[in-house]
Amino acid sequence: MPVTTPKNQFSGPAVEVDKLSFSYSRLKVVDGLSLGVPKGISFGLLGPNGAGKTTLIRLLVGLLQPRSGTIRTLGQKPSPKIAHLIGYMPQLSSLYAELSVIQNVEFFARIYRLTDKTERKRRVEEAIKLVDLWEHRRKSAMNLSGGMKQRASLACAIVHNPPLLFLDEPTVGLDPELRVTFWEYFSALTRQGATLIISSHTMDDAAHCDRLAFMRDGKVIAEGTPDELRQATGRPQATLEDAFLHFVRREVKKNVE
Amino acid sequence: MSSSTLTIASRIVNQLIRDRRTIVLLVIVPLVIASLVGVSVPDKRILDYTAPAILAVLILFFGFLLTGISFLRERSQGTLERLMASPVSRLDIVGGYLLGFLLFAVLQTMVLFFYFIYVLNVSFYGDLWQILVFQVLIGIGAVCMGTFFSVLAKNEFQMVQFIPMIIVPQMFLCGLLWPVSQMPEYLQWLANCLPMTHGVEGIRALMLQGQNLLDIGKEVGVLAAYAVGLLILAALTLRRGASG
């Protein structure tokens, strides 16, 4: 599968977050969270609904402003200046319902400043083929199935080959075969130097990530490679699900004490 | 004008072209309304008086409704969130909407204008280009008003509820049905604060009295002030709802 090397001159960590907090009115959604994501890996944010994953991603892409703490994305504060280096796939499919798949992807290619017509055409075609929607490229987004919408949405996020990608639950609604294809593509991207930050609540996705952060109540309760997190339970046969529950229990115990 | 503004405008044009019902709503429905007025009016002088007002009222009505619903959908389906995370600025987004919808506003005005003049024989003494410029000015206010009010609506039903609150009172007070000067004084004061009143008075002066844009400086000024104010409000409130 063809993947173009993304442009990225910054040599430090892809994302650095220090004591980050955010609340909606009085509800604290992100609570003093610190995190470092090295470049060129897939980093999973794993946790149940309401853990603060989506809010954290929205803070990292600059859609929300933190109440306190600092964020460095590719060495800079999130701003429109670096937005062209970032790809973002929101949780909703986020497509223009009346437009066809190709029109949607083409629109985002233009928005992300792919000005050269030949290059833009090639990238649009590549992105649509990658998500296996080439045959459906002329279909309106409103006539696509849920899984197809998800795939079209991914095509819009990757069309400009960004060095840093934020994917909010990208594999929801995908069949197992396509899920594998997606992960093959994600791995190809990280091999080329791109950094992927992926939120999920499924352990299937977690196992594919190079590193994971388990999240609960707006905090990171554990961070490491999938193997490190499994080993931390003290049981050689432990799954990532076991590991997550282990860290949740430890956190609850800590809070009680 | 930035390339992002043009990209957003061309996307809006594409969306509207692919949605045939909206095209019918923008072009055919106004012609049906114009025909009904033309056929039902007992006196041609009344038609001459009413026709320019219909031009101004319809552009404000459709501009408000279509932009409001489009922006609401942009918020609810998550595309605005995606745009706000991209390199485009808020002004690019509002500017793109303005440009896209104003193309249709000009088209609607021209279709309706020629229908009034050549089919319904409405009297006309002005310049078409000045009417178009004035209609664009009304349209800018309408698009920005729709953008701003879409922030206050949670769904399309709530957006439609703004019509009897924002548009219908203006239709009764703007002089479309009877002259503002015949209303009670306090209502005249209220009517003179509303953009639709200035739109109707301005376009009547352009079409029926052969005046030019300089002659109707007051109307142009008030509508421009509304447009600028609403543009700022629309740009400032754009982020709301884009990020949950």
Image: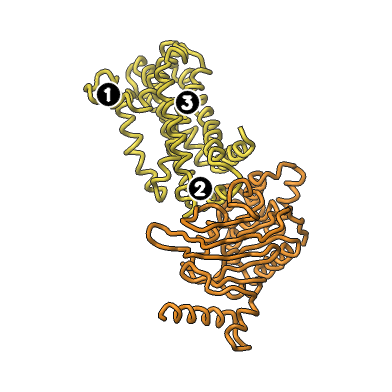
- Say which of A66 and B56 sits in front: A66
Describe residue A212's horizontal placement relative to residue B177 as left or right. Answer: right
Label 2 SS: helix
* Amino acid type shown at disc 2: Glu
Q: Residue at x 60, y 63 (%)?
A: A170
Q: Can you give x and y, in whole percent of width and height, for residue B97 in the image?
A: 53, 37
* Amino acid type shown at disc 1: Trp
Image quarter of residue B53: top left
Whether pointer 2 and pointer 1 mark residues with C-beta atoms closer than 8 Å, the reply is: no
Number of the label disc, if any, that sits on residue A224: none
Question: Pointer 3 indicates a residue of which chain?
Answer: B
- Say which of A227 and B191 sits in front: A227
* N-terminal-most mark, 1 or 3: 3
Q: Is B30 situated above or below A20?
A: above
> In the rendered image, what is the letter of the chain coloured yellow?
B
Residue under circle 3?
B137
Question: Pointer 2 indicates a residue of which chain?
Answer: B
Number of the label disc, if any, that sits on residue B189: 1
Describe residue A104's horizontal placement relative to residue A188 as left or right. Answer: left
Question: Pointer 1 indicates a residue of which chain?
Answer: B
Q: Residue at x 61, y 36 (%)?
A: B6
Tell me, yes or no, if residue A227 can be seen here.
Answer: yes
* Amino acid type shown at disc 3: Leu
Q: Can you give x and y, in whole percent of width and height, for residue A256 in the image?
A: 40, 80
Q: Is B139 situated above or below A50?
A: above
Q: Quadrant of the N terminus of chain A?
A: bottom right
Shade representing chain A: orange
Residue under circle 2?
B74
Same subunit, tags 2 and 3: yes
